[in-house]
């Protein structure tokens, strides 16, 4: 399988390319500034990693992007670039829940010895709120138990579970003293939605039929005030077309 993945839903930008097709295996990755600053480096980073991998965009099985929730500008950037690259290369797009990517990043880095766990993923939503979702990992598969939602740090509680409970994300240094609903026995792990986590999630999500065509790829917003209007959808489409043009120009000899 040949995959490109990137996430710009937080202050960090993460890009990764993987190849595992029997003939060759490799992983290439890059980090940078995300959110509103991602537009300056995302396409260049993608093209550089593709160059390092020796693959063309049209060879990819899918382009994976962190679809949110997260930074409004960062999500629009990631979606536009994913659409633009996919349009130009004729490949599918795989939107990946950024909170699920947080859970997978935490599992991979801090729970490798656990065959099952319940992970509540938490990302700073600014405006004195956090994004939250809960997932269960068992039998090498993820299941969503509680969908993404917004809440105040003091309102956080973890769903009851007989499995080891984990809270993972980037909120502990910011809201730590206010997360009074976390059980004392719950493990806290700092984690971000890394592109490598998207790559590991991709096989399960592709098998579930969650890949879409470029024009169907959209960010996931939680706050009502950033819900997409017709004008915003048109703006994303225009940005995708510009991304395709920029990518073509950058890739041209």
Image (tube, rainbow, N blue to C red):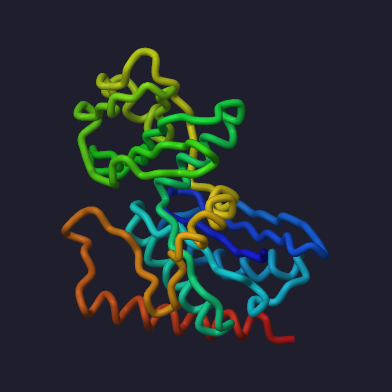
Image location of residue 151, percent across then percent down: 21, 38
Report the quarter where the C terminus lies: bottom right
Rendered view: 61 above or below 25: below
Residue nearest the observer in this picture, 235 or 91: 91
Residue nearest the observer in this picture, 121 or 71: 121
> At x 64% / y 54%, what residue is drawn?
30
Image location of residue 58, percent across then percent down: 64, 80
Q: Is residue 89 left or right of residue 52?
A: left
Quadrant assignment, res 222: bottom left
Question: How many numbered marks have been drawn onto this rendered protein structure?
Answer: 0
- Asked whether residue 105 appears in the rendered view, the answer is yes
Of all residues shown, which one is farthest toward the left?
224
Quadrant assignment, res 251: bottom right
Image location of residue 185, percent across then percent down: 39, 14
> At x 48% / y 57%, what residue is drawn?
205
Quadrant assignment, res 237: bottom left
> At x 38% / y 83%, what residue is drawn?
238
Of all residues shown, which one is farthest toward the right?
23
Residue nearest the observer in this picture, 208 or 113: 208
Report the quarter where the N terminus lies: bottom right
Rendered view: 244 above or below 67: below
Image location of residue 79, percent across then percent down: 42, 68
Residue nearest the observer in this picture, 148 or 212: 212
Rendered view: 189 above or below 13: above
- Asked whether residue 78 appears in the rendered view, the answer is no
Of all residues shown, which one is farthest toward the top?
184
Q: Is residue 98 left or right of residue 17?
A: left
> At x 47% / y 37%, what residue is drawn?
137
């Amino acid at each position: 399988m040949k995959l490109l993945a990137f996430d710009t839903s937080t202050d960090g930008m993460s890009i990764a390319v993987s190849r595992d097709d029997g003939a060759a295996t490799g992983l290439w990755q890059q980090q940078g500034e995300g959110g509103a600053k991602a537009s300056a480096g995302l396409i260049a980073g993608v093209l550089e990693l593709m160059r390092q991998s020796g693959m063309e965009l049209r060879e990819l099985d899918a382009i994976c992007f962190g679809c949110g929730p997260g930074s409004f500008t960062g999500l629009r950037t990631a979606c536009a670039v994913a659409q633009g690259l996919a349009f130009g290369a004729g490949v599918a797009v795989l939107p990946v829940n950024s909170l699920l990517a947080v859970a997978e990043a935490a599992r991979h880095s801090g729970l490798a010895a656990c065959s099952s766990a319940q992970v509540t993923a938490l990302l700073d939503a600014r405006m004195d709120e956090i994004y939250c979702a809960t997932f269960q990992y068992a039998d090498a598969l993820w299941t969503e138990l509680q969908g993404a939602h917004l809440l105040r740090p003091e309102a956080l509680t973890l769903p009851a579970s007989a499995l080891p409970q984990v809270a993972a994300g980037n909120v502990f240094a910011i809201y730590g003293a206010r997360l009074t609903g976390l059980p004392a026995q719950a493990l806290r792990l700092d984690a971000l939605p890394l592109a490598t986590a998207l790559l590991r999630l991709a096989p399960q999500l592709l098998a579930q039929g969650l890949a879409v065509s470029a024009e169907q790829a959209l960010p996931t917003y939680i706050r009502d005030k950033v819900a997409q209007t017709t004008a915003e959808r048109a703006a994303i489409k225009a940005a995708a077309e510009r991304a395709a043009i920029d990518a073509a120009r950058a890739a041209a000899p």
